[in-house]
Image (cartoon, rainbow, N blue to C red):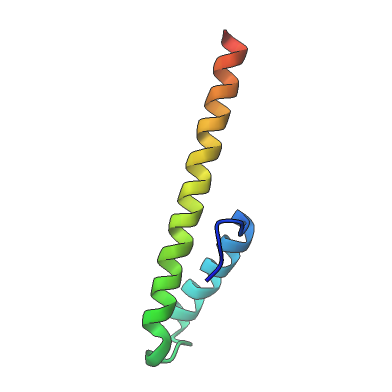
Amino acid sequence: METNNESYRDAETKLRKIVADIENGDLDVDVLSDKVKEAIRLIRLCKDKLFKVDEEVEKILEELDG
């Protein structure tokens, strides 16, 4: 597992690959659970990064209006 230093783009790319593998039936049943757990981790990472960026942009915009 990677840390939160993983970029949004890298996480998104990995997540898209996992989703494509699941949709195509390319995953062995033995690794499906691990891949779903990894997908959840990646979704959370992306969500956290988006939330932080949104907060930063809102703060910058408030400073411009102030």
Q: Quadrant of residue 22?
A: bottom left
Rendered residue at 49%/56% (across/down): 45
Q: Give percent across and percent down for residue 13.
A: 60, 65
Left or right of 33? Residue 15 is: right
Locate the C terminus by quadrant: top right
Please say if 16 is above or below 56: below
Rendered residue at 54%/16% (across/down): 62
Please say if 42 is above or below 38: above
Q: Quadrant of residue 9?
A: bottom right
Left or right of 36? Residue 50 is: right
Rendered residue at 51%/44% (across/down): 50
Nearest the viewer among 23 and 51 is 51
Q: Quadrant of residue 29?
A: bottom left
Please say if 28 is above or below 58: below
Please say if 19 is above or below 59: below
Rendered residue at 48%/87% (across/down): 26
Q: Residue furthest top?
A: 66
Nearest the viewer among 44 and 24 is 44
Q: How many marks?
A: 0
Q: Give percent across and percent down for residue 33.
A: 36, 81
Q: Give percent across and percent down for residue 63.
A: 59, 15
